Image: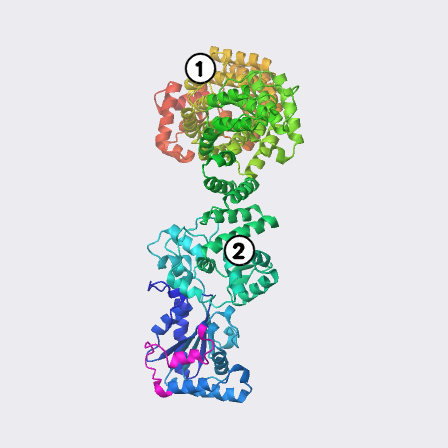
Amino acid sequence: MTTGLENASSDPRFVGRQSQLARIRRAQATVLNRGWQMVCEVVGEPGVGKTRFVHEAVERPVPTVPWAVGTCSPDERGVPFHVFRHAFTEGQSLRRGLRAGPSTGQTWAESAAAVPPAPARASDARRFRTYQLARRLIGLAARDGLVLVLDDLHWADASSTGLIAHLLRYPVPAPLLLVLVYRPRQMATPMPFGPPDPGEHADGESTSHDRIELRPLSLAEVALLHPCDGQAEVRARYDLTGGNPGYLAALPVDPTPTSADPVRVAPGARLSDAAMAELRREWTGLPPVDLACLRAGAIVDAPFAADLLAEVAQVPAALAVEAGWRLARLDLIRRVPGTGRFAFRHPVLRMAVAQDTDPAWQVEACARALTALVELGAPAADRARYAERLLALPSGRWADRCVNVLCRAAQEVRRETPDLAIRWLRVALRALRPTAGLTQRRHDVSLVLAQITGEAGDLAESRALLQEIVPLFPADPQGRRAQAVALWARVERLLGNYAEAAAISRRELAALPAGAGPTGGYRLATEIGVAGILAGRPVAGLPDVLGGDLGGSGADRASLLAVRSLAAVHDGALDDARDLLDAGARIVDSLPDGGVRDHPDCLTALGLTELYLERQADAGRHLDRGLTLVRASHRDDGLCQLLLGRSQVAYHGGQLPAAIELATEAGIVARRIGSHHLLSFALAFEAEATAWRGGLRDDDRAVALARSAAGIATDLASWCGRTAATALATAALLSGDPATCAELVRSAGGDSRLSRLQSTLRPRWFELLCAAALAAGDMADAERQARLAMAEADQVGLPGQRGFAESAYGEVLLARGEALAALPHLETAADLFRSGGMVLRRSLALASLARAAEAAKQTGLAARARRRALELAGWCGTERVGLRLARPVGPREVAALTDREWHIARLAATGATSRLIGRQLNISPRTVEAHLTRIYRKAGVASRSALVAWVARLDDTDR
C-alpha cells in the first residue's frame, strides 16, 4: 500500500474506528460463509484516514483469507487497468496466500493491450469481452477467498472504472470482498450505487454491499494521538484540523496560530516534507491560470470571490471564474453555499499551497489584494488583515501604506472590538521605525493607541504611553496637545493620582496658546474639577460656560457643567447646582448616543448630582444610558464609575440585591483596570448594602468588605476615604459596635460639625451618630446629634435628608419612653422618605412608627405601619425591618443590643440550646455562644436563666 497523507507521520498509533473495523470483519465472514462477491465502500474526506484504516483492516483479517491491494495514482491515469495490474502483478509482499504467478501477470498485460485507445473504442462487444476476461481472472484468484482493495479510485483510469462498474453489475461467483476506497467529491464517474438500504434485510446487514463513511476524530481521540502535548496545544490542533488525522500528521510541531487568521501558524513553522509531497500531487500539472488562481486563493482570506482572485492572480476575470469552477471540480476549493464565493476545502491545504508558493510572489500578491480591497471599499477588518500580513512578509516597501490602513481600520473597529484595534496599532507602531522622518507619525499612532488602551481598561499601558509622548507634542492652536494632556490627566485620575491629574491639567490650562479652540480648555477644566472633588477639595472658580464661549462640542460643555454642579452639591450651593445641572442635562438629552458615547464621565457626574438632589428617576435614566453605551463600546474605563453610580441609585431606592450586584461588578471591573480607589468605592458600597440586608452572615461580611475598602483608601480627606470610613461605621453599628461607628464618622467628618463630609448628606451622618449614641446608652449625645441633624436638614432643604433628621429625633423620643411624642416625627419621616424615593429608610421609619404606636396603645396605626413596613422590607430584600419590629421599646440595655442579638436572646429565652439555635439560624453553635456572651454583657446578666428572666420582663408580647 502507498503512503497516504494520513501516514505522513511516523507515529504507528491507530485510534478509534473500532465499529468500522468490525464491519469489515463481518463483511469478510459473510463472503466466506456465502461464497459470493460483496462490495464494501470506504469513503471520506481527503486525509480522513481511509488508507490507514484499510491497512489496519487487512492486517486483522479472518484467518486464511488472502488479500491484494491496488492503488491509483494521478500520474498513471493513462495506463489501462492500472489499479488491477498494481494489485495482481506489482503488489506488495504483504498479500498472504495469494498466488498470482507469471501467467496471471501476463494475462493482465494482454487484457490491458486489448483495450484500444479512447478515440478508437467503437466496439462495446469487444470491451465487454475484455471485462468478462478480467472478471474470470479475478474469480480464479478468489476461488478460495480474496479481499481485493482498490485504493484512491478517484484517480483511477477509465478502463479500471469501467471494469469496477462491470463487476458491480456482474458479481464474481466466488468469495470475493471488493473494497473500494475513494473520495466521493473527486470521483469523475460516481459509483453506480449509493448507501445501502438498512431495511434490505431484517438483521440490518447487506449481502451485496456496505458503505463505511469515515468521520474526523474526536477531541479525545486527537489527545490519544498526541499524548505528550498539553491540553491547549491539542485543542489548537483539533480546532485547526477539525480532527482530520491526515492533516494532524501534516501539522508542524507548534500549530498555535499567531494571528486572527487560523492558517497563519508560528513564524518559521512548516508542514513536513512528506505531507507536502503528498498534498502537492493534487495541484501538480494544473494549467498556469488554474495554478495562479489556486495560489492567489491561498493568499486571500476565505471565502474569496472570483473577481478578487483575478486581481491577485493577474488574470482576466472571465478566466478566473472558469478556473475557480475547475478547481472546485477537483475539490481543491469548494463553493460556499448561498454565495458566489469559494474557500479551500481545508485550512491545512491552504497552508500547503501557501508554503509551496514563492515568497516574493506572495508579497506582490498580498499587496495587490490590499489594493483591490481598498478600491472595493472592503470592511476595515478585511483590509487590516492583509496589511498585517503584508508587514509580516520580508519586504519593507509597503510599510507606510499598511500603517495607514491599520490606523484607519483601528479607528473604525475601536468601539466594537477594541482588542483588535489595539493589536493593529501595535503592529503599525512596530512598522514605524524610530527615524527622524517618522517621529511625529509615531507620536500620532502612540496617542491613538494610548487612548484606545485606556478605554479598554489597560490604564497602566495608557499612562506609560502618554507619559512618553505627550511632553513631545508642541502647543498648537487646534488644541491637540491640550486634549492629549486632558487624556493623560484622566488616566492619572482613574488610577487615583488626583494631585498629579490636577497639576498636569492646571499647567496645560495656563499655557494654552491664544486662539486655541475651547475643546481642550473644557476638558482640562473638567479634569481639574473632578480631581478636586475626588480629593475632597472641590475647586471653585472653574470656567463659566453658561455665559462664556459656547464653542466646542456640546458633550464637552455638558461635562464641565455636570462637574460644576456636582461640586456645588458637595458645598451645599443647591440653587447653583440645580441651574448648572439643568443646563447640562438639556445638552445631554438633546445629543444622540454618538455624541455622548465618548463622555461617560459626563453621564456619571449628571447621575450623581441628580441622586444627591433626590431626582432618582433622572439619575437612573442618565446612568442607564451611560451603561448601555459603554457596554456596547467595551469601555471599561467608564463602566466602573457608571456601575458605582447606578449602585448608589439602587441603594438609595432600597433595591439592596441590585445595589450589591452592581457594586460587585464594579469591583470586578476596578480590579481588571487596576484602579484601587474605584475598588475602594465598590467595596464600600457593597458593604453598606450588605449590612442593611441583615442576613445571618451579612454583619461579618459587611464589616470585612468595609475594612478592605478602608485599607485601600487610607486618606480620610479624599472622597473614597470618607466613603470607606462611613461604610465601615454603618457596618460596625449594625453589627453591635456603636463606639467604632461614632469614632469613624467623626474621623471622616473632621470635627463635631462633620464639616469635611458632603453638606447635603450631613443629616444622614448625624442620624447615624444619633443611632450609635442610642446603642451606647448615651441619651444626651443622641439628642444632641438629632438636633444637629435637624439644623443641617433646615439648611439643605431636601425631603430625604429632612426625613433622616425627623427619624433621629423620633428615635430619641421613643428611647426616652415618650412614644406619643415620637409618633408625629416618625410619621413625618416616613412621608419624607417616600417623597425622596428612599424605600428602605421608609420601611425602617414605619417599623419604628409601629413600635411607637404599640407603646402608645394606638393599635390601628401600629397594625397599618407594621403591615406596610413588612411589605416594603420584602421589596427591598432586607431582614432588618422584621428584626426591628420584634424588639420591645425598653431601657438602655435593650437599645444596646443589635437586632440580631435581640433575636438570639428571645430564642435562648424559649429554652433552645445553642446547637438548636444554630441549626435554626444556619450558623455554628460556637457563633451562637459568641453572640450570647455579648448579650450577657450588654444585659448585665451572668447566666442563661437570668437571661430568660430579663427577656420575659421586657418582652411581654407574643410576636
> What range is drawn magenta here?
75-103
Residue drawn at the location 44% of the way across and 82% of the way down: 37
Provide residue 80's location: percent of width, then percent of height. Answer: 46, 81
* Number of the front mark, 1 or 2: 2
> Mark 1 or mark 2: which comes first in sequence?
2
Observer able to see residue 852: yes
Contact (CB < 8 A) between labels 1 and 2? no
Q: Quadrant of residue 944?
A: top left
Residue 35 in the image: above or below residue 823: below
Label 1 sits on residue:
777
**Which three-letter amino acid code belongs to the residue tagged 2?**
Ala
In the image shown, does 263 or 31 lie closer to the viewer?
263
Residue 354 sits above or below residue 38 on the image? above
Q: Which residue is mark 2?
A: 302
- Mark 2 residue element: loop
Q: Residue 635, percent across and down?
A: 53, 36
Binning the other alpha carbons within 10 Å of mark 1 as few (below 14), some (14 to 19) or many (20 upward) gives: some
Give left or right: position of 741 versus 226.
Answer: right
Quadrant in which the N terminus appears: bottom left
